[in-house]
Amino acid sequence: MTTSLTVTALIRHVRRLGEAHREQAELLDLTHDTVFVRDMSDVISYWNHGAEELYGWTKEEAIGKTSPHLLKTRFPVPFGEITEALLNTGRWDGELIRTRRDGRQVVVASRLSLKRSENGRPLAKLETNIDVTERRRTEESLRRSQAQYLAEAQKLSLTGSFGWNVSSGEVFWSEQSFRIFEYDPSIPPTIEALLQRTHPDDVAFVQKTLEHAIEARRDFDFQHRLLMPDGAIKHLHIVAHAEKESVFKLQYFGAVKDVSAARQAEEQLHETRSELARMSRVTALGELSASIAHEVTQPLAAIVANGEACLRWLFHPTPQPDEVQTCVQYMIADARRASEIVLRIRMLLKKDTPQKTQLCLNEVINDVASLIQHEILTHRVSLRLELAPGLPPLHAGRVELQQVILNLAINGIQAMGGIDDGPRELVIKTFQDEAGNVVASVQDSGTGIKPESIGRLFDPFFTTKPDGMGMGLSICHSIVEAHGGRVWASNRTGRGAIFQLSLPPFAKAGGL
Ligand code: ADP
């Protein structure tokens, strides 16, 4: 009796359990997600309605089959790794590619959980899937169209991009970068490949610039030339930002722009400008030498004549000191006249009275800085401006002051022309001195001034350059003096020269 009661209770319990399972299974059918269960050998034991919809196989067809086989699963990592993760952690998440009954491929986000028996033995794998095919497809086509737009934009703007992992040596070039360097996109991009295309005269400069940037872990921004296999020259502008992820990791992301066209236009402009300058110099020089010849020859001829007469009187059988004295007096007077003529010619050179306005010296220097960009680039000089803010304004001619600063800057750049080692740095500073005057200094790291030249720099026609005219500093001197200021030069300790000019502020210089 007791036994039969127990059996009946047991049967009822088992039935209840069965019903609970069936109810749970029916509930799982209501969800839109795909759920299926398989044993440890991947034989499918449960297949919900969502699975039927996603994969096209009915319950009857799927149950009893092995899942990787039925669904031709492609795993993102080796299958063993998935099993291992499942056994160790009880779960695994990832994306799988599977083939439906109708042959179409689907991408599914898969989540696997492991069911264990009470004593911990792995029993079954429960898998849920969400179909992400459409999402992936949209993302992929978006990525593709973005990449395409980017490639087109790079092509149009002649700008390529690159990445450089300095720590691992890996380099990435965009399609346009390959096009700029004229390499086949199948070759691995490297820094050596860049250097191979670099103009031989610029290789050392590029290497040094990159080395310095890496050493200081700093951004870089420079221009250089490429020499293409067909002999063509390209001008490039390379800019890159340093990503410092850790002490050991340094990466650059940058852009490389082909600026040949802009450079050519600039060079043409420069040529036209210097041709104009040369012509006006030639004209000025022609006029000047004509008037010098005309006006100075006469007193010089008189000096020569009087000198000869002097000699004659000196070596006369009866020397005539009175005559000698008269001749010498004439000679002195003629020499004075000649130097007055030279002075007058100098005054002529600056005959148009400058239009003086209230202006700021820093602005004048900024104007000049943009005018000399070409010289700075071609002479590989770096220009540093240290302009004091809040300087009082000046009462001056803008063009005249530009001419002064321009002359000093160009002289500085030329003085660094013959320097092969060490930095070539032109520094222009402004500040206010103790007397309240506004001071500008132009310093270079060039050859410096020879001691024997230092007293004659500002003399007209003093030059040490084979093609120099020696008028630049003399004109600077006249202009600065006409503004009530002072200009002077000295050698720097170390290397190079420093030219300084001081000008009274507006209030003291005839302004308000
Ligand atoms: P030019 O440039 O035609 O020679 P300048 O009057 O401008 O005429 O300069 C006169 C001379 O002064 C130059 O030939 C050169 O010897 C010297 N000089 C000018 N600037 C510098 C400088 N920054 N460093 C060294 N010497 C200089």
Image (cartoon, helix red, strand yellow):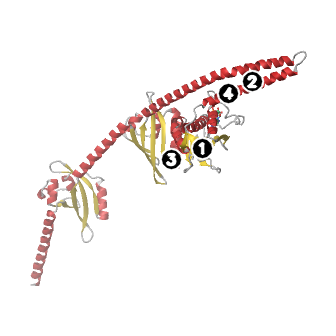
> Which numbered marker is on residue 510?
1
- Residue at left offset 54%, top offset 44%: 358
Of the four image quadrants, the one with ligand 1 is top right
Residue 448 in the figure: left or right of residue 179: right
Q: Quadrant of residue 161?
A: top left
Pick the front one: 251 or 50: 251
The residue indicated by pointer 3 is 214
**Image-based side of 187 in relation to 102, left or right:** right
Instruction: Determine which residue is flagged by label 2.
Output: 334
* The N terminus lies in quadrant: bottom left
Please identify, in this view, whether the residue under mark 4 or under mark 1 is nearer the observer: 1
Q: Residue furthest bottom?
A: 1
The alpha-carbon separation of the residues under discs 3 and 4 comes to 57 Å
Q: CA distance from mark 1 to mark 2?
A: 38 Å
- Measure the alpha-carbon separation of dots 2 and 3: 68 Å
The first of marks 3 and 4 along the sequence is 3
- As drawn, is 10 to the left or to the right of 39? left
Q: Which residue is mark 4?
A: 342
How far apart in space, not on screen, are marks 3 and 1 (Cα)?
A: 53 Å
Whether residue 63 can be seen here: no
Frontmost residue, 418 versus 398: 398
Q: Which tag is nearer the camera, tag 2 or tag 3?
A: 2
Eye-nearest disc, 3 or 4: 4
Give how far across and how far down residue 463 sits, in percent.
Answer: 66, 30
Q: Amino acid at mark 4?
A: Val
Q: SS of the residue at dot 3?
A: helix
Disc marking residue 142: none
Secondary structure under the numbered disc 4 in the rendered image: helix
Q: Which amino acid is tagged 2?
A: Asp
